[in-house]
Image (tube, grey):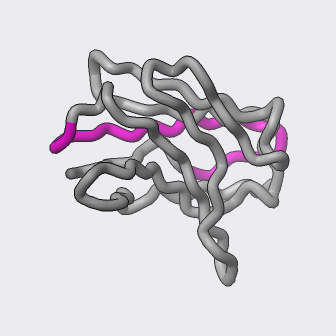
């Protein structure tokens, strides 16, 4: 299983970023996917999740109405559209999948929100 996140960077408060996570090594369309984030000195927390087929999505209260998770089963990719970014959104963002073989994360992508 391989997960590769991209799309992070430096953005001003109120700005937007779109994160991508390309995957391989498992049958993507058969698994739910998550985005997590971890800020310095804090635990890794779930941000958003999307079910098989994309029929249901869940969000942490802190990002509801600002972030949107989506998936493309033709390209085995999961996305996180982040709008109205706040300084407290700054963190390393990871995508995650749980398969029969275990729980897997990518290497993460850094998001910095600063003026």
Q: Residue furthest front?
A: 100
Which one is in front, 109 or 80? Answer: 80
Which residue corresponds to the image point at 29% horizontal and 32% vertical from the top-left?
A: 28
* Residue 14 is a magenta residue: yes
Who is closer to the viewer here, 9 or 48?
48
Name the residue located 21 percent from the left edge and 51 percent from the top edge: 1
Q: Is residue 80 above or below residue 107?
A: above
Percent x, y of residue 114: 77, 57
The number of callouts visible is: 0
Q: Nearer the viewer, residue 56 or 5?
A: 56
The correct choice, above or below, for 27 with respect to 100 in the image is: above
Q: Residue at x 58, y 39 (%)?
A: 49
Tell me where residue 39 appears, x and y as whole percent.
Answer: 66, 70
In the rendered image, the vertical position of residue 68 relative to residue 100, given as above or below? above
Image quarter of the C terminus: bottom right
- The secondary structure that dominates the magenta segment is strand
Q: Residue 10 versus residue 18: which sits nearer the camera?
A: 18
The percent coordinates of residue 16 (x first, y second) are 69, 34
Q: Residue furthest left?
A: 25
Image side of residue 28 versus residue 45, left or right = left
Q: Is residue 2 left or right of residue 50?
A: left
Magenta stretch holds residue 63: no
Residue at the (60%, 55%) spot, across then down: 111
Magenta extent: 9-26
């Amino acid at each position: 299983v391989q997960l590769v996140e991209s799309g992070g960077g430096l953005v001003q408060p109120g700005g937007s970023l779109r994160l991508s996570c390309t995957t391989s090594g498992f049958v993507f369309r058969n698994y739910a996917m998550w985005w997590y984030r971890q800020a310095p000195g804090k635990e890794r927390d779930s941000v958003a999740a999307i079910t098989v087929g994309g029929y249901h999505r869940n969000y942490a209260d802190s990002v509801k109405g600002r972030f949107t998770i989506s998936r493309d089963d033709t390209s085995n990719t999961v996305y996180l559209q982040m709008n109205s970014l706040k300084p407290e959104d700054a963190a390393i963002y990871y995508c995650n999948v749980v398969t029969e073989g275990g729980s897997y994360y990518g290497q993460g992508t850094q998001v910095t929100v600063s003026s």
